[in-house]
């Protein structure tokens, strides 16, 4: 059984920790890296080539859109799921146009991230 690898990009240590706990509990999934800045995330993701990236829009430096653009351009096989406190249609549309598989509002959909990743892991097996 192939373990699905996940990379987290989130600038809030508290949110990052919650995501890590939630996703580590998914059987067949393993978080292989984390970053808080766009440049660090892009470099690590392209080097690591995880199966899944959970990506916040607002980062300590740069934007999740910058990361999404670079990753989708160079490694389109990586499934990127955007996560944001800003659940506005323009952000959602832009994320999907740039190649995100889905877009989650942190306030409303936080728990769905685990469900989507679990479904993605199950589908891969």
Image (spheres, rainbow, N blue to C red):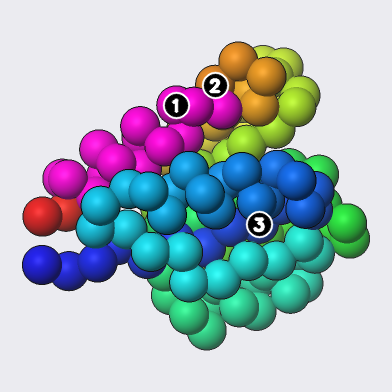
- Per the model, the C-alpha gap separating discs 2 and 3 is 17 Å
Q: Position of residue 35 (x, y in %)?
A: 70, 66
The magenta span reads 110-123
Q: Is the residue under label 2 in contact with that under label 1 (CB below 8 Å)?
A: yes
Q: Which mark is residue 112?
A: 1
Residue 120 in percent (x, y) is at: 27, 44
Residue that appears at 67% across and 19% down: 107
> Do the residues under discs 1 and 3 have CB atoms within 8 angstroms?
no
Residue 14 percent across, percent down from the top left? 75, 46
Indicate which disc, 2 or 3, sits on the residue closer to the N terminus.
3
Residue farthest to the right, as pictured: 61
Picture disc at residue 120: none
Residue at 66% in and 57% down? 9
Return the disc, 1 or 3, that comes first in the chain's sequence.
Answer: 3
Residue 91, located in which quarter of the rendered image?
top right
Residue bearing mark 3: 9
What is the quadrant of residue 52 in the picture? bottom left
Residue 89 visible, this angle: yes
Q: Residue at x 24, y 58 (%)?
A: 28
Is the magenta region chiefly helix, strand or loop?
helix
């Amino acid at each position: 059984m192939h373990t699905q690898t996940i990379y987290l990009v989130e600038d809030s240590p508290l949110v990052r920790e919650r995501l890590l706990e939630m996703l580590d509990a998914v059987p067949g999934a393993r978080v292989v890296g984390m970053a808080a800045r766009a440049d660090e995330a892009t470099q690590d993701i392209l080097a690591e080539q995880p199966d899944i990236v959970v990506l916040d829009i607002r980062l300590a430096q740069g934007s999740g859109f910058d990361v999404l653009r670079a990753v989708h351009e160079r490694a389109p096989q990586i499934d990127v799921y955007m996560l944001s406190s800003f659940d506005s249609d323009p952000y959602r549309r832009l994320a999907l146009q740039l190649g995100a598989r889905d877009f989650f509002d942190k306030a409303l959909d936080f728990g769905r991230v685990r469900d989507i990743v679990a479904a993605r892991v199950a589908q891969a097996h």
